[in-house]
Every structure is written in structure tokens, then in C-alpha cells.
Image: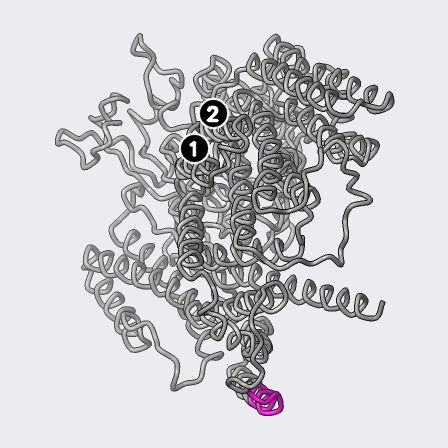
């Protein structure tokens, strides 16, 4: 009993230490790659000259694509005639290039605050500010906002003082199943009209409106909602553009009338992101990143006609019939300094935007001073970042950014001021643009300054951990010859003293540098880990001594295959087709291993199952048109497969009455769930909303899917079938097309895998094969039973990791959650809720995981293998992959690049 207790305590300790190492490794990725780039403490910078406008009206049409606005109708007219007339007569236009992820929150932060939110902000909140940042609204005297409750509150919360006023409709209005989402935009325009009407009789409000440095912000969500619900090519989406155009025309008339046509109002019309043809956004496709920008009014250039070809090679000028008008493209963050310059407020201190001068209709002096202000504002961030890094680095180790040392900064500023005083405005503008470019590069340099140092510390610790796990496997699960006299181990007291000395040196070094607490964790973690490795050096000695008696060529061949397999899995995260290649290779396993001669039917089933599953990674993850008939067919396939499983089981072991009743009930439930998506989508197409009964069935299915399998028999086959039926029912409700077949095909292959592993054990001379329907897992698991490790266990563990990755990338992944089609969750809800919708999509991705994990546990029970040894091998394979990915992490680009190519 005491030895068993000691063994359990060791396992618990090992698990806790391993979990800690992995949590630290995971969190280090965010500390190294995804820390917030924002710095604080800068002085706001404003242009000293009087601004051209007293107020600014910002209209953001959420989800509006550039081509949807600019493209003419077949008859030559525009679906947005008012904005078209502005482009052709009295404004400047262009394309605003957004950054990924093309979501509403990051898009609005770029527009209004002038910087691109990093990934660390996305996980911390939707409606609140995860990090404090400055914005044009914050710098204004007053800002009035109308629109969505998902966007407006974050700018009001981030404002200093109480001068940002928000007017939002209830969140329940954002319903994808509504008859017409354009009413959201009608609500905004009506509210604005009422606001100006009431201001005529409200003297205090009128006085506030007549002050300068005011901003009016209209957030129009109707286009985005209609795009998600009906696609951007639908009549609903296109008609909504016409409604917005009419609303903008009326808005301009109301504003100009209120202010007596004083010519002191600037207007900016743009979008936060576009939308794909299949109604999603979040990635980097041109339909998502190209948004319209139309600016007119006070201080803005009127339409500038050109006769020469413009320097744009994308063909859009010809498609949009706008080649005769100057096009001025900008990065989305450039709009913030443009708005600040027009009304004379300081540029947001965290802005990385560059003022687009071609939009300004002002003197060269004003342009030069504005660009100088922009340069100083960006340089202030650079200087603050440099000071912070200098304070936490020993002077002899600090390496400044060479293109912008302190002396070069001073020289840049001095030259710029001289050029402005000499009225060489063009040269001053050019110099300031160069300074901004260097400062932005310098910001990245200091932001990633410690990346290499931290990366090396974390990798050293993780390599040590992986080495320790390998030594534990060799020590406890491999039959090595023990030679205590050969090569003495390092004495533990010397090893302990050495580790203490290293710990003290690292701690003192970090204390002198005033490093953050997390740096201590990353730098000190390798010390105890490598201490444990060196303590087990005797195991390595035993391995070397045992080498002559081992089948070296067989071992070498196995490890080469596993190494190749791991590389294939790593590549599959970037090119899903590699999973198809892997499945094609795995399909040949029974023929190459000699199992085909002993189990022909099972071998052929394995071959066909692998090939059927291999088709799924070749299918597109996003961009599929919904095909609800396929979901119904998948439900029928599930019922057919379940009936076959039950029939084959009945031939060997009769079912108890209670089991038979439960399976029949579950199969009827699957039949209902196969039909619910069809009814739901039919109702939504007829604009009758989500039927309440369907919603009740969907949510009750989701809740019961975790409980019903627990009521089934503890015999392996019965429990597995119950889990499969419960999870498939939920999966069908979350499906919109061919992916609904995935659980059935995967389960078929998993069932064959369990049977063929039993045959593999028989071929190795292990005790007789038991039927799955007779094994009671509650009585058969023996935790203390540990057999010696075999090379074949490495193959089993690799299969498990391979199938887990296939389950993840088979039909859905992180990209499909980020850029998902809301149609997948219409059976559950249609009112926009990012957390519930994201949670449902995550559950859809996890369902195939559960099927594979249950299968692996079944293999362990059915073949009486050591679950601990298999777990350790899986851990080593996973850790080797994790090390690969640690060096492949990028803090730029599209989430859609993960597993979709």
C-alpha cells in the first residue's frame, strides 16, 4: 500500500510540475509576442495654426466594401447617388486599407485612435477598453455618438472627463433573423434628426454645439448585419447602401441648416472593414481589407480631375469608372490624424497614422506644420519607449536604435524647424515623413528588444522539461540494463550548490535591471528543470550501455518515421492538404505491417475510412455556401451507421432492454436534430424569425449531450455509441453543409482503429481478444498496472496525435471561429452575441476531439496498455511540436492563415 501511495504521489507531483511548465510556456508566448505596444506619458501635440473646420461629422458604415459603394449599376447610375456626386464634385475619395483582424472593434480603434490593436487586446473584452488609449473623441471638446452598443461604450469609457455622449439602441435589435436590419441605420438617422431639432429649443445644448472642436459620430450597423444574414450580393445589403446614402444626404442638410451654412463642417464617410462574398470578415481578403473613404467639407480638397494614368495597378479605377478623378489611398490609422488636423485637436498620443496631405485644402505652411506635429507626436512615443527600455537595461548592454539615436533625433527636429522658417515646406514635409518612418521602425525595435533573450530562456526550460520526460520514460517503462558502477552520477550536493549559484546570479542580474516579475519566472525556470535532468543522468548511462542489445536499425527507423510524422503535422497547420497526404500514408499501415493477412475485413475498412476522412482537409474552411440538405443526409448516415454498429454488436452480445430503449431514443433524437436546421433556415428565408420550438430543441440537445452518455451502460461499446449519438446530434445543429458528415466518418475510422489495434496486440502474442460489448471499463482499469514499453506504443501515440490534429483541422479551426458564418448558430440564436456564438463554434470544433480522445482511452482499456506510458509519449510528441511553433509565432498577418491553405 505504501509503495502504491508513493507512486500516486509521484504521479501527482509530476502532473502538477508538468502543468506548471506548460502554463508558463503558453503564457510566455503572450509576453514575448503579444504584449501591448502602447506607451503612456507623452505630451499631446496639436498644430499651432488655426484649423479649417470647427466641427467634424464621422459616418462609419459597418461592413461596407469599397466595391459595393463605388461600382455603378448596369444602367450607369450609382446605388449611392449623393456620395457619388460628392466624389465627382466637392470631395476627395480613396480606399482605406484596413489591417487584420478585420473586425469591428480593431477597425474603429484604428479609425478613431490611430493605432492597430494587438492580439492581447482581443482576448480581454469587446465592449470595454482592455488597455487605456487616447482617441480623437477624447481630444475633442464634445463628441456625440449614435449607434451600436458594441462599439460606442468603449470610446466613452476611455475618454477623460465627461464629454463623450452615447446614444445606443438595445443589443437585442442586432438580430440576424430580423425582417430588415436597415432599421438599425434608420434609427440612427432619426435620432440625429431629433437631436438637432431639440437643440434649437435647448439653449445650453445649442451653446455646446456652437463651440469648436466638436465631433459627431454615426455608427451604422445595418449593412454589416444584412451582409451576415443575406450576403453582400443580396438585395437587402445593396438596398441598405441606398438607405445610408439618402440618410447621409439628409444629415448634411440638417447639419448645414443648423449651423447656418457657415462652411466650417468637415465630413468623413468610411467603413471599419469589408466583407467576403459568403458574409464573413476577420481575415485579410481584399473584399475585407478594402473600405471606402470619402471626405468633403471645410479644409478638404474638392474633386481633382486627372488626365494622366494614376499609379494604381489593381484595375479598380476602370471598374468603378473613376479613373478621371484623383484617388488617394490611405492606411486606416491615417484617418485619425486627418480628422484631428481638420478640427485642430491634438493627434491621439498613441496614433501611428501618417497625415494624408492630399486630402487637405490649405496653405503649404499649414500642411508643413501639421506634418511636423504628426512627426513629433510619433517621435514622442519612440522616445518614451526608448526611455523605458533604457531604464531596465544595464548601460553597457543597451543597444540604441542606430537610425534614431538622441543626437539624430535632435538633428531631425532642428532641420525641420529651419526648413519651415525658410518656407521650404516641401522639403520640411519630406523630412518629417522620413522621421515618422524611422520612429515607427524604432518603436518595433524597442517593442521586440527582449524577444531573443526571453525566447532563449523559455526554450532552454522547455527543452529541459522534454529531456526529463524522455528520461522518465526510459527509467520507468523501458527494460534497460542497470549498471551502477559505470560512469558515476554527478554528486547531488555538488549539483545542488551549482544550481543555487546559478539562481543567485540570474536573480541579481534581473534585480539590477529592474525586470518585471515574469522575467524571473522565465529565466529561473530552466534551473530546477535541468537540475532534475542531470540528477537522472544515470538513466542516460544505462541507455548507452544497453545500446548493443537493442534492435538499433528498427529503433532508428521508428524514430525517423516519427520525426517525419511530426514535421508533417507541423506543416499541416499551414497547409491542410498535408493531412490528406498523412491519411493516405496511414491507410497503408495494415498492408505494410502484415495485419492484412490476419484481418482482411478490418484492414480494408481502415483503408477506406482513411481515404474518406482524407477528403475533408481538401474542402474549404470558409466560403462555403450553406447546403442544409447535406445536413439532413448526414443525419441519415449517422442513423444508418448506428444501426450497423448495433446489429454487429447484437450478433455477439444481446442488448439489455434499457440499453436498447436508450439507443432507440437517442437515434430518434438524432433524426429530429437532422431536420431542425432545415426548418430553421426555411423559416429565416421566409423572414419569419427563429421558431421557438427549434430553439428549445437546440439548447436542450446541447445541455443533454453532456449528460445522456453518463446514463448508458459502462460496457465500452455501449458507452462509445451513446457518446457518438449525443455529440453528433449537437454537431448537426451547428452544421450548414458537408462538414456534417465529418463525425460519422471519423467515428467509423475510430471504431475500426480500436478493432485493428486489438488484432495488432494479438499478432504480438498478447492475451486473447475480448469483444468491446463485453468489456466493462469501470471494472477493467488497473491504474497500478505498468508493463514495459514497446516500440509499437510510439506508433499508437503518434496515431492519437495525428487524429487529434485531423479532428481540429478536418472541417473547422481557429480561422473559422474568427471568420465564421453566423448561419452555423442560427438554430440556437440569431441576435448578435459574440461570446455565445464564439462559444458554440468552439464547442463544434471540440466535438471531434472528444470522439478521438474517447477512442484512445478505449484502446488503452481494451488492450490493457499502460495509460501513463502512452500519455508520456504523447506529451513528448506534443512538446516537440510546441517547440516548432514557438519559433513560428507571428504577431502580424491574418488568423485565416492558420490551417486553411
Residue 132, picture quadrant:
bottom right
Residue 825 screen position, x and y as percent: 63, 26
Nearest the eye: 573 or 640:
640
Residue bearing the label numbered 2: 248
Location of residue 697 in the rendering, given as x and y in whole percent from the top left corner: 76, 20
Mark 1 touches mark 2? (CB < 8 Å): yes
Query: Quick one: quadrant of the N terminus?
Result: bottom right
Residue 526 higher or lower than 183, as above or below = below
> Which circle's residue, 1 or 2, is located before the other in the chain?
2
Q: Tell me if 525 is positioned left or right of 43 in this view.
A: right
Q: Is residue 139 visible?
A: no
Q: Is mark 1 on a helix, strand or loop?
A: strand
In the rendered image, residue 69 lying in the magenta stretch gets the answer no
Question: In the shown orientation, is residue 744 left or right of residue 388?
Answer: right
| Marker disc for residue 849 | none
Circle 2 crowding by C-alpha within 10 Å: few under 14, some 14–19, many from 20: many
Q: Distance between the residues labelled 1 and 2?
A: 9 Å
Most foreground residue, 719 or 452: 719
Residue extent of the magenta highlight: 490-500
Name the residue at the front extreme.
Answer: 765
Q: Label 2, secondary structure: give it.
A: helix
Identify the residue shown where x is 83% and y is 19%.
661
Q: Which residue corresponds to mark 1?
A: 269
Amino acid at each position: 500500500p505504501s509503495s502504491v501511495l508513493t507512486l500516486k504521489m509521484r504521479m501527482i507531483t509530476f502532473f502538477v510540475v508538468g502543468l506548471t511548465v506548460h502554463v508558463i510556456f503558453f503564457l510566455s508566448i503572450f509576453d514575448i509576442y503579444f504584449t501591448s505596444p502602447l506607451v503612456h506619458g507623452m505630451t499631446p501635440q496639436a498644430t499651432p495654426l488655426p484649423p479649417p473646420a470647427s466641427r467634424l461629422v464621422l459616418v462609419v458604415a459597418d461592413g461596407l466594401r469599397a466595391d459595393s459603394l463605388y461600382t455603378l449599376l448596369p444602367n450607369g447610375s450609382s446605388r449611392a447617388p449623393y456620395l457619388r456626386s460628392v466624389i465627382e464634385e466637392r470631395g476627395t475619395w480613396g480606399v482605406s486599407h484596413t489591417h487584420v483582424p478585420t473586425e469591428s472593434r480593431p477597425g474603429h480603434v484604428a479609425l478613431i485612435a490611430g493605432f492597430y490593436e494587438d492580439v492581447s487586446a482581443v482576448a480581454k473584452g469587446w465592449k470595454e477598453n482592455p488597455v487605456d488609449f487616447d482617441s480623437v473623441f477624447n481630444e475633442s471638446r464634445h463628441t456625440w455618438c449614435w449607434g451600436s452598443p458594441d462599439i460606442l461604450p468603449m470610446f466613452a469609457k476611455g475618454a477623460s472627463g465627461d464629454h463623450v455622449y452615447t446614444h445606443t439602441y438595445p443589443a437585442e435589435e442586432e438580430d440576424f433573423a430580423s425582417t430588415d436590419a436597415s432599421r438599425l441605420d434608420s434609427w440612427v438617422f432619426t435620432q440625429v434628426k431629433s437631436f438637432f431639432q431639440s437643440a434649437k429649443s435647448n439653449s445650453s445644448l445649442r451653446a455646446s454645439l456652437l463651440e469648436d472642436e466638436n465631433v459627431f459620430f454615426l455608427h451604422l450597423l445595418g449593412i454589416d448585419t444584412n451582409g451576415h444574414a443575406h450576403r453582400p450580393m443580396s438585395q437587402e445589403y445593396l438596398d441598405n447602401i441606398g438607405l445610408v446614402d439618402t440618410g447621409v444626404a439628409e444629415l448634411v442638410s440638417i447639419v448645414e441648416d443648423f449651423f447656418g451654412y457657415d462652411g466650417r463642417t468637415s465630413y468623413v464617410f468610411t467603413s471599419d472593414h469589408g466583407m467576403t462574398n459568403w458574409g464573413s470578415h476577420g481575415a485579410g481578403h481584399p473584399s475585407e481589407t478594402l473600405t471606402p473613404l470619402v471626405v468633403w467639407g471645410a479644409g478638404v480638397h474638392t474633386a481633382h480631375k486627372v488626365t494622366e494614368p494614376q499609379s494604381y495597378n489593381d484595375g479598380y479605377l476602370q471598374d468603378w469608372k473613376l479613373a478621371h478623378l484623383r484617388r488617394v489611398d490611405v492606411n486606416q490609422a491615417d484617418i485619425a490624424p486627418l480628422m484631428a488636423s481638420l478640427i485642430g485637436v491634438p493627434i491621439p498620443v498613441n496614433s501611428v497614422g501618417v497625415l494624408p496631405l492630399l486630402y487637405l485644402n490649405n496653405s503649404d505652411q499649414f500642411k508643413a506644420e501639421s506634418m511636423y506635429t504628426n512627426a513629433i507626436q510619433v517621435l514622442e512615443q519612440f522616445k518614451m519607449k526608448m526611455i523605458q527600455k533604457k531604464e531596465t537595461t544595464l548601460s553597457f548592454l543597451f543597444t540604441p536604435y542606430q537610425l534614431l539615436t538622441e543626437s539624430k533625433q535632435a538633428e531631425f527636429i532642428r532641420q525641420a524647424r529651419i526648413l519651415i522658417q525658410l518656407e521650404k515646406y516641401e522639403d520640411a514635409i519630406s523630412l518629417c515623413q522620413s522621421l515618422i518612418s524611422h520612429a515607427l521602425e524604432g518603436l518595433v525595435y524597442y517593442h521586440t528588444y527582449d524577444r531573443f533573450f526571453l525566447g532563449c530562456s523559455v526554450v532552454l526550460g522547455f527543452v529541459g522539461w522534454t529531456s526529463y520526460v524522455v528520461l522518465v520514460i526510459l527509467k520507468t517503462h523501458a527494460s534497460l540494463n542497470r549498471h551502477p558502477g559505470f560512469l558515476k552520477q554527478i554528486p547531488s550536493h555538488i549539483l545542488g550548490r551549482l544550481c543555487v549559484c546559478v539562481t543567485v546570479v540570474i536573480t541579481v542580474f534581473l534585480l539590477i535591471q529592474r525586470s518585471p516579475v515574469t522575467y524571473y519566472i522565465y529565466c529561473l525556470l530552466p534551473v530546477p528543470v535541468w537540475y532534475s535532468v542531470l540528477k537522472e543522468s544515470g538513466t542516460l548511462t544505462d541507455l548507452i550501455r544497453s545500446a548493443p542489445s537493442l534492435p538499433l536499425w528498427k529503433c532508428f527507423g521508428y524514430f525517423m518515421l516519427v520525426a517525419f510524422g511530426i514535421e508533417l503535422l507541423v506543416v499541416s497547420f499551414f497547409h491542410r492538404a498535408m493531412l490528406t497526404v498523412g491519411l493516405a500514408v496511414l491507410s497503408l499501415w495494415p498492408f505494410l505491417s502484415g495485419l492484412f493477412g490476419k484481418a482482411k475485413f478490418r484492414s480494408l475498412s481502415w483503408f477506406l475510412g482513411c481515404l474518406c476522412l482524407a477528403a475533408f482537409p481538401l474542402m474549404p474552411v470558409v466560403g462555403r455556401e450553406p447546403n442544409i440538405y447535406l445536413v439532413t443526409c448526414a443525419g441519415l448516415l449517422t442513423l444508418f451507421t448506428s444501426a450497423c454498429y448495433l446489429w454487429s454488436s447484437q450478433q455477439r452480445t444481446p442488448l439489455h432492454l434499457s440499453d436498447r430503449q436508450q439507443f432507440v431514443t437517442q437515434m430518434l433524437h438524432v433524426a429530429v436534430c437532422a431536420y431542425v436546421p432545415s426548418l430553421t433556415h426555411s423559416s429565416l428565408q421566409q423572414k419569419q424569425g427563429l421558431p421557438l420550438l427549434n430553439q428549445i430543441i437546440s439548447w436542450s440537445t446541447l445541455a443533454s449531450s453532456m449528460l445522456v452518455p453518463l446514463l448508458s451502460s459502462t460496457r465500452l461499446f455501449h458507452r462509445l455509441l451513446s457518446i457518438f449519438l449525443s455529440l453528433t446530434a449537437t454537431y448537426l445543429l451547428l452544421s450548414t453543409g458537408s462538414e456534417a458528415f465529418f463525425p460519422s466518418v471519423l467515428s467509423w475510422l475510430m471504431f475500426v482503429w480500436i478493432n485493428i489495434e486489438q488484432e495488432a496486440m494479438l499478432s504480438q502474442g498478447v492475451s486473447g481478444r475480448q469483444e468491446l460489448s463485453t468489456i466493462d471499463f469501470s471494472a477493467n482499469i488497473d491504474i497500478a498496472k505498468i508493463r514495459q514499453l514497446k516500440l509499437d506504443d510510439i506508433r499508437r501515440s503518434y496515431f492519437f496525435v495525428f487524429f487529434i490534429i485531423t479532428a481540429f483541422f478536418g472541417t473547422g479551426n481557429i480561422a473559422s471561429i474568427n471568420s465564421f458564418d453566423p448561419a452555423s448558430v442560427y438554430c440556437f440564436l440569431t441576435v448578435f452575441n459574440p461570446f455565445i456564438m464564439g462559444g458554440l463554434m468552439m464547442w463544434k470544433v471540440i466535438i471531434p476531439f472528444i470522439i478521438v480522445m474517447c477512442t484512445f482511452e478505449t484502446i488503452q482499456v481494451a488492450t490493457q496498455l499502460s495509460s501513463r506510458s502512452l500519455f508520456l509519449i504523447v506529451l513528448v510528441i506534443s512538446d516537440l511540436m510546441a517547440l516548432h511553433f514557438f519559433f513560428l509565432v507571428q504577431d502580424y498577418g491574418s488568423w485565416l492563415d492558420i490551417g486553411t491553405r
